[in-house]
Image (cartoon, rainbow, N blue to C red):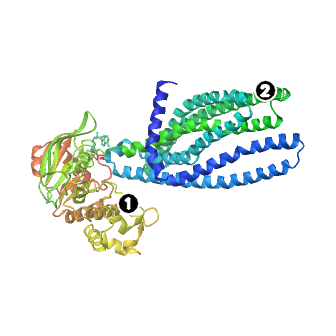
Amino acid sequence: MDAVTIKSRSSSFKTFLKLIPYILRKRKYFAIAVASMFLSSLLSVLIPSFTRVIIDEGISAGNFQVIPYYSALIIIVTALMSLLGYFERYASILFSQNVVFDLRNDVFKAIQRQSYAFFDEVPTGQLIARVTNDTDAMSRFLSFQLRSFINAITLTILAYVYMFQMNFKLSLLTMLILPVMIIVNLKYSSMIRPLYSTIRYQIGVLTSIVNSNLSGIKTVKALAIEDFELERFSRENDRLFELNVKAAKIRSIYGYCGRLILGLGMAFILLYGGYAIIGGEFTIGELTAFNSYLLMLMWPMRALGFFISGFQRSMTAAQRLFEIMERLPEVKEKPNAIELPPVKGEVKFEDVTFSYIKGKPVLKNISFKVNPGEKVVLLGPPGSGKSTLIRLIPRFYDPDRGRILIDNVDIRDVKLKSLRRQVAFVSQEPFLFSGTIKENIAFGQPDASMEDIIAAAKAAKIHDFIMTLPRKYDTVIGERGVTLSGGQRQRLAIARALLTNPRILILDDPTSNLDAETEKALVEDLKEVMKGRTTFIVTQRLSLVKLADKIIVLDDGQIVEMGTHEELMARRGLYAKMYSIMLEDQKKVSPVEMPIRGDSD
Ligand code: ADP
């Protein structure tokens, strides 16, 4: 066993310790399962001893009364075992499902608690695989493997009690088989375990590909890159196939190895036992019983092997779940965080530097101040850091250096909920889920009143449209219902953002997916929406730039120009250059592709 194996075994054990509180919480079911199993093992070791009595004291001794009596006992014992088997299975399923239910809830809660950086780091496919496959693995472990392990141990002990009573020397000799079996199984598990974790990872990779392909299927079709996507999928699928074949190979080789060892053991017992019977030290009944016990032990020995490999595999799954649960979100709320009082909407960046990856800052020494109610447009080439900058205001990420103040309060000193109620963020592609319009607007604010919802919809100029729908605010949208246009989706997202009547509004490229007509109408209505709210807009569209009181031009993570349209035009710098490109673009009939249009997400 190498150092790595030992280390992983001890870490598996540590993980198991973390599971114990979950197990203890459901100890009632566990106790019923283990008690039924113990009784059932106790009964099952009786059967070979009954057989021995039938042979030795019935058949060989010519005492025929013994035979029906013990046969009847065997029937009763078997019936009782079936009944206990029912309790054992039922209780252990209840036990494992209950524990997994708690685990799943806790993992889901932990995922909700994470901040943005976590989701940058862990692809959605991996996350889905973790929550579904890993909890599945846990349920298998708890309902089957753990039970098998306890069963194997009790059965082995009980069988040996009877075997030692019958023949001490032979029992001792058969015990030699146990370490050989265990060594074979350990070798097996150390080979198969890393393979299993690679397989799991690979399943995650495939899920990620399918996920991103399906969510971007229209883009894939538009770019006609189906072949490229197919090739990528097929390559990863091949890898999964090879890994599975490799695992199957190892499984079959070691599976037969174990059987061979036991076969040799059986042959040895028959040989030794046969001579012992002839020598008068052993009876035929004893040999038969002995053989039955050895057959009975075959399964526990294999179960032990399964348990060892299963244990590590399950603990790897459990460890991944605990990793999520124990991970502290990057954006932490201070224990003494205060409620952000209702703000006027002044926003100040003080020498803010931020990086996604250590040592590679994407925002450098950003300082500016925005007065309450001012409209700020952020401009700059793709990748210059516009989207990143606005994500810092609702604290999706924390800066590495510097501070962000709202009404002179450092946003790291306030409760996240109170901050995000006053800073509304509308993303480029707003997320609408399958549900009613009402639910979509009140997303995250289940106690919002109908008046508030209607007021928000009116402000976002979507109310009139909603009223034309057959079920009005109760109309189901999304996969199961009415399909909305890009403009309607944006307006719904804006209504959602306005529900808490925030003083600060952030719009991340709100018109990027809209046609010229829709854009024009939305921009017109946005004027109304922005009234009295400090607004940050990331855009490449002239129509929105025109609304700005202040323009911030970013380049390579730094502010290169800042001021009003007139001031910046006079400088004849980057803004003036971008402005002329935007102007050109607006002249075109369809403003679909812009030369400076950024993939700001
Ligand atoms: P813009 O909005 O101006 O197009 P972004 O703020 O989106 O620019 O990106 C700025 C830089 O940060 C880019 O180099 C981009 O690749 C990088 N970046 C953006 N998001 C992430 C992320 N989640 N993880 C790592 N790097 C990122």
Occupied quadrant, residue 165: top right
Residue at 60 percent across and 35 percent down: it is 305
Binning the other alpha carbons within 10 Å of mark 1 as few (below 14), some (14 to 19) or many (20 upward) gives: some
Q: Along the line of sight, which residue is nearer the eye, 539 or 63? A: 63
According to the picture, the residue beneath numbered tag 1 turns out to be 432
State how far apart marks 2 and 1 are (Cα): 75 Å
| Local SS, label 2 | helix
In the picture provided, is 485 more to the left or to the right than 567? right
According to the picture, the residue beneath numbered tag 2 turns out to be 272
Q: Position of residue 15 (x, y in %)?
A: 45, 40
Q: First in sequence, mark 2 or 1: give its number.
A: 2
Q: Along the line of sight, which residue is nearer the eye, 187 or 82? A: 82
- Res 228 seen here: no
Q: Position of residue 369 (x, y in %)?
A: 12, 50
Task: Relative to 215, say whether 364 is above or below.
Answer: above
Foreground: disc 2 or disc 1: 2
